[in-house]
Amino acid sequence: MKNFAKIIIVFTTISAAIMELIDTSIVNVALNNMAGNLGATIEDISWVITAYAIANVIIIPMTSFLAAYFGRKNYYLYSIIIFTIASFMCGNSTSLWELVFWRFVQGIGGGALLSTSQSILFDTFPPEKRGTASAIFGMGIVVGPTMGPTVGGLIIDAYNWPLIFNINIPFGILAAVLTYFFIEDSVHHVEKPKIDWLGIILLMVGIGSLQYVLERGQSNDWLDNEAIRIFAVLAAVGLIAFVIWELYVEEPVVNLRLLKDSNLSITTMLTFIAGLSLYVSVFIYPLLLQRVLGYTATMVGMSLLPGALGSLIVMPIVGRLLQGGTSPKIFIGLGFFILMIYCLLLYRASDMNSGLLDYAVPLMVRSVGISMAMVTLTNQAVAGLRPRDIPQGIALNNMMRQVGGAFGIAIMNMYVAQRYAIHRNELITNVTEGSANFIARNNALVNGVGSKIAVGANAQQAAYKLLDLAVDKQAYLLTYLDGFLFSMLFIVAVFPLIPFLKGKKMSAEELKAVAESSH
């Protein structure tokens, strides 16, 4: 393969993966803007996030089957076109539910861009360069969710929410053109698989319902809400039936038998935790800076960029070391340990006077930890699988990362709500009107606001509101500090699994199998 064509393929696949991952988080900072423009409540507008996530997590485990059925190049090209058209329709939606529908369609198109991009990228590199391919793909996994709030904040502050979707259009058109002319289809043609209709339906019901419960559970009071109860039952029944059927049917849409391979099953567990850690860390940090410290969305997004740039430096180094024979257990263990250090550094760096520079070192540490863990897990997910099974292994691994992120955010949402209530109650009990500290603080606030409010306004009432706001911010600060420590518990859970991974360098035959996985 000529070097120019290889560069074009790398650019196309990594850009498509980043574009898809950015869209998982880019709308988070635009919800207020969208709600006001479309006349929707914040609770209703969150369906814009939920619809995309549900479609994404349904389609990802099916990508291997769909690529085999339609042909890898055709499926990849169709997915880019669907994603691009849906982006245009999202940007031109005039009602909430129109936007939600097209976000679901966008998620269907975007789901293929992860696993198929990874498969094409592996095929682009010779077998001995597979570590480099993993590193390049890992950049997209880490940089995408990190850049989402940054890009979204810049667009919202300077323009308006439709540009969040319309900005995909030129990149989507370019990716489609490059795919058509430069990306080759499989050279190893396989018989078109039968369509496992029941498996597809059960997957959609089970995974879709589970994602709905995780996304909407906290805002809808979990099992106290009838809709959540119904979807929880559908998730349980659908997933159990899906597992039983997929293990029974001869040509399953998702080959769960691959999880008999201990390396893949352990890697998917570790990837679940890595996805949880990746999404939770990006979830708590912006809330702390915006809700407690008062920074704008743009400022928060820009503060994340140094960490993303750090990943771009570290990941190729990790890829080369893996390629040179360094044990993957070292990088996985060290990566997760560094993520624990990141949580502790955030805990230590956060108070009411924290500036953005106080978070620079923790975020750089996070980039190193995520880079080590994610590149190695991507590399190890398919170690030892047969060539024909590798695309399914990639799809399963990517699905577990997405589901891990959904679980992490749902759990953290519930934890934050509970800890906030506890901390606020504790703080209020210490605010007594007769105490010397209260009198001094109250008098200072009354005198301070008295000269700034209109004649006849109640300065004491304004002072009480400021005191309540101070208590509220302090309660959230303590809550997010608890959240940093709580997230460490998930990371600790992975260490007993690491020794069971394959620690040796992959053989030439295995490397060749990976390179041929997308054929």
Image: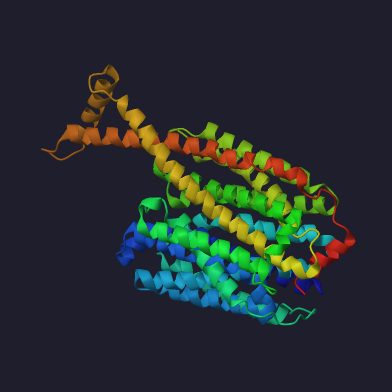
Q: Quarter of the image holding residue 391?
A: bottom right
Residue 255's x, y, as percent? 68, 67
Question: Looking at the rendering, in which quadrant would you find the C terminus?
Answer: bottom right
Q: Residue at x 77, y 54 (%)?
A: 319
Establish if 463 lies above or below 323. above
Residue 219 vertical position relative to residue 177 in the rendered view, above or below: above
List x then y, in percent, for residue 246.
64, 68
Is 328 on the left-hand or right-hand side of 98?
right
Residue 181 percent across, percent down from the top left: 70, 82
* Left or right position of 506 against 339: right
Asked whether, in this view, residue 174 is left or right of residue 267, the answer is left
Residue at the image position 38 percent from the left and 34 percent from the top: 422
Find residue 287 and report its horizontal and vertical position in percent: 45, 46
Which residue is at 54% across, 31% downward?
A: 348
Q: Give the residue furthest to the left.
A: 456
Can residue 256 be seen here? yes
